[in-house]
Image (cartoon, rainbow, N blue to C red):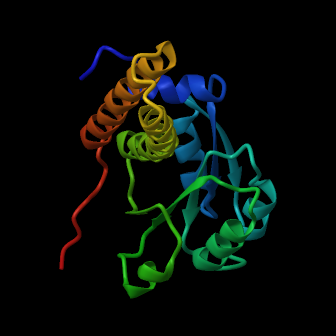
Amino acid sequence: MSQHKTPHNIVKKRKGDKKNVLIIEDNSELAILYKQFLSGNYNVEVAQTGVDGIDKADSSTHVILLDRDLPDMNGGQALRELRNNKAITARIAILTGKKPDEGLLNMPVDDYQTKPIREKEINSLVKTLLLRDLFQDISEDLFKLTSKRSALQQVDKTHSEEYNEITDMIEKRRDQIEDILDSINNHSIFRSFPS
């Protein structure tokens, strides 16, 4: 690991103290339990129907945990409506009692976890989804910086202060990406399913 801030600290400081998590779960006992599991680290809101969840999700929502079986619509329908709303850029994970099936291939979902899901697992899931967002942002920045450095090389400005600053920033972004990948591997919540 590099000497830069850990990815979790970067995630917490990027957009305020706590990220916003929306739980869309019709089982009120599970919804309360998940909220208790996550409330120490995140701002958590609960919706018990697909329609209520779609109404509560907005541009400030960072992660959505969506039950696949809701009383008013299935999770796939709710997922499509959430994805069709361009203001909502949240990472979305399905939490369900159903084992994955072929229908999962057609779902625009970031993760899929089967219940039961314990406190450590749900916190790791949310953290991993936030790290994936951070990974994407830092990767985009790395590509922009690399393009700028290439432009300076083309005009023979490799000895300029700007070139050196960009090169330092590229190295920092590479270290951050490595740290994020290490962190995702260390917090991996990916499970193998019996065949």
Rendered-image quadrant of the C terminus: bottom left
The quarter of the picture where the N terminus appears is top left
| x and y percentages locating residue 78 in the rendered image | 67, 72
Of 124 and 146, which appears nearest the observer?
Answer: 146
Spot the residue most to the front. Answer: 156
How many numbered callouts? 0
Q: Is residue 190 left or right of residue 167?
A: left
Compared across the picture, whether 59 is left or right of 14 comes to right
Against 141, residue 78 (above or below) is: below
Q: Quadrant location of residue 81?
A: bottom right
In the image, 132: left or right of 26? left
Tell whether 70 sits left or right of 121: right
Q: Residue at x 60, y 46 (%)?
A: 32
Which residue is nearer to you in this view: 11 or 172? 172
Query: Of 89 and 165, which appears nearest the observer?
Result: 165
Tell which of 12 and 174 is nearer to you: 174
Q: Position of residue 94 (x, y in %)?
A: 50, 64
Identify which residue is drawn at 69% across, 50% down. Answer: 46
Q: Is residue 132 above or below residue 109?
A: above
x and y percentages locating residue 107 in the rendered image:
51, 76
Does 95 appear above or below 10?
below
- Can you name the residue that lies furthest to the bottom here? 102
Residue 60 found in image quarter: top right
131 vs 46: above or below: above
Q: Residue 176: x and y, percent? A: 37, 29
At a point 42% along the width and 47% down the height, the residue shown is 125
